[in-house]
Each structure stands twice: as C-alpha cells, then as structure tokens.
Image (spheres, rainbow, N blue to C red):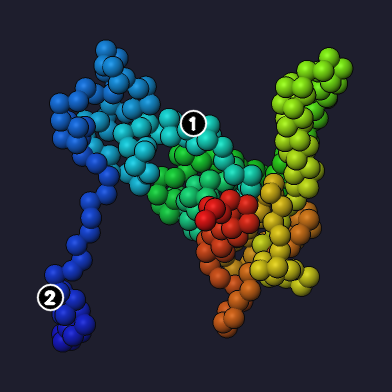
Amino acid sequence: MHDPNPIDVAAQASGEPTFREVGVGPWAQTHPGEPRPDDVSSPNYDARFDSALLDEGDRRNVLDRYRYWTVAAIKADLDSRGRHDFEVAVENWTHDFNIGSMVRTANAFQARRVHIVGPHKWNRKGALMTELYQHVENHPSITELVECWKLRIAGEIAAAQAQRNALSLRFYKAHSEDDTKTVAETLKQLQKLEAKIAELEAARIIALDIVPGAVPMETYHFPKRCLMFFGAEGPGLSEKALELADDVVYISQFGSVRSINAGAAAAVSMHAWIAQHAAPQA
C-alpha cells in the first residue's frame, strides 16, 4: 500500500469545504404562517406554483424568482420575457457528450432555440435538466434544418412587412387629419418595424470551425439574428454544414491542440454574441 499523498492528507484535515445550501426548503418552513400560493382560496394564489415543490422544497438550479414554480411556468415566463435572437445547432452524428453542456449554456444565455442534427438521442446529464426550459428541436439533416430556419425567417419578414403596410396607411390617414399624436406614435412603431425587418433580412448562418478561409471571432460582428453551427468533438462540422453557412468563424487559440472542447467553443461563441448585442449597460 502506498503512503497517502501529503496534499490529500492536508486537504482532509483542513475542514474544508463548507458549501452554502442552494434553494429553499418547504413553503411552511420558509414562509411560516403565510397562505400557500397553490391554494385557490388564498389571496396570493398563483397557478405557476408546483404543489410538490411547496411540500418538499426547491433545490433546483434555477433563479430565485422561479422558486417553487412548475417547469411549464418557467418556460412560459422565459418566452414572455423574450429570448435572444440567436439560435444554435449541433451535429450529433457521433453522439457527442458535449451536447448537454451546449444546451445548458444556451439556456444560460437565453438562446431562442437549440437544434440537434442527426440522431435525436444524446446524453442529457450535462444539461442538468435545463433542456426542460429550452426549445430543443431535432432535425434529420443539416439541409432540412437550414430550409426550416430560412422559411421561419421569411415568414417573420412577411409578417413584419404586413404590419408595416397597415401602419403606413394609419400614418398617412392621421397625417391628413392633422392628428399629431397618432402621427408621432405611428412613426415610432414604423421605425421599430423597419429596424426589425432590416435585422431579419441581415440574418446569417455562422459555422464555428477552424478551416481555411475562416475569420477570427475577435474581429467578427455577429448579426443580431443568426443561427450558429457547431460540430462534434474531433471531426468538427460536416462538409454540408460548411457549405450551407454564410460565414465561417474560428476562436483564436494559442496552444498546441487544433481545437478546444466543443461545449467550451459553444459557450465562447454564445457569449461573444451576448457581448455585442445584450451586454448589461454600465
């Protein structure tokens, strides 16, 4: 038997670590004397609360404002608040174990959707249940995904253009009647719609991979509306994915390996979009 490593011995004798308890206990303990929000006769009744969580406590990895809420209620709230305008897709031909990590990161950065191309089965352990709060779609091929995404963008453009046309009629009618208040309000709405249409028309598909012709992420400006492609660990993206992408971007690296972990690459890329389009104002 080997003598124990002195670092191991010292670590065990240190009394560390002491972790803080995550989440909340049962409602009766955390809110003594307060009526339960799942009681329909209660003045603070709220259908978003989960009775089982109120009974047992909520130790999930969720924000405090979602404590005791049902999964469906949390997902609906994220939708109502507005998800960000980027989507991510990962090719699953090799059953990559990084997909769970990508889904978890997509939830953290509030991606609009996650697309999994190829076999629909993947290891959900790394997602830590965040796939329940995220819109995850499966596609049999990268070609089918691109067709669906472009049709969705085209439909949103058509809807926005129809709204713009209706508002234009309202604007000219109000202008002819010297209704200055309506003119001002309608003009603001028209400007927002024009900006939305411009963003949709500028939507692009971005492949993240280190291949000849790719541009460094550090100098790349992400369009507000985009779909990012990520490949499997090792082989990277397929030839078809690279062919269908509008732009190919790589993360600058300075060590000896060709690429970083696929889950890490996805996190870096999503955060790059956040830094350009959704960073909190100082």
Say what amino acid the circle numbered 2 marks: Ala
Q: Give the mark nearest the N terminus, 2 or 1.
A: 2
Q: Residue at x 66, y 54 (%)?
A: 228
Residue furthest to the top = 41
- The answer to whether 10 appears left or right of 80 in the picture is left
- Rendered location of residue 173, percent (x, y): 84, 16
- Say if 19 sits above or below 30 in the image: below
- The answer to whether 133 appears left or right of 266 in the picture is left
- Rendered location of residue 142, percent (x, y): 70, 49
| Circle 2/circle 1 CB separation < 8 Å | no
Q: Nearer the viewer, residue 183 or 214?
A: 183
- Is disc 1 surrounded by few (<14), some (14 to 19) or many (20+) residues within 10 Å? some
Q: Which residue is mark 1?
A: 76
- Say if 124 sits above or below 49 in the image: below
How many numbered callouts?
2
Q: Residue at x 56, y 37 (%)?
A: 82
- Rendered location of residue 198, percent (x, y): 79, 42
- The answer to whether 87 appears left or right of 178 in the picture is left
Task: Please tell me whether mark 1 sits on a helix, a strand or a loop.
Answer: helix
Q: Nearer the viewer, residue 12 or 97?
A: 12
Q: Residue at x 19, y 36 (%)?
A: 30
Query: Is any part of residue 248 visible from this angle?
Result: yes
Q: Nearer the viewer, residue 181 or 105?
A: 181
Quarter of the picture holding the N terminus: bottom left
Distance from Cα at disc 2 to Cα at disc 1: 47 Å
For residue 13, the mark is: 2
- Rendered location of residue 180, percent (x, y): 77, 22
Say what amino acid the circle numbered 1 marks: Ala
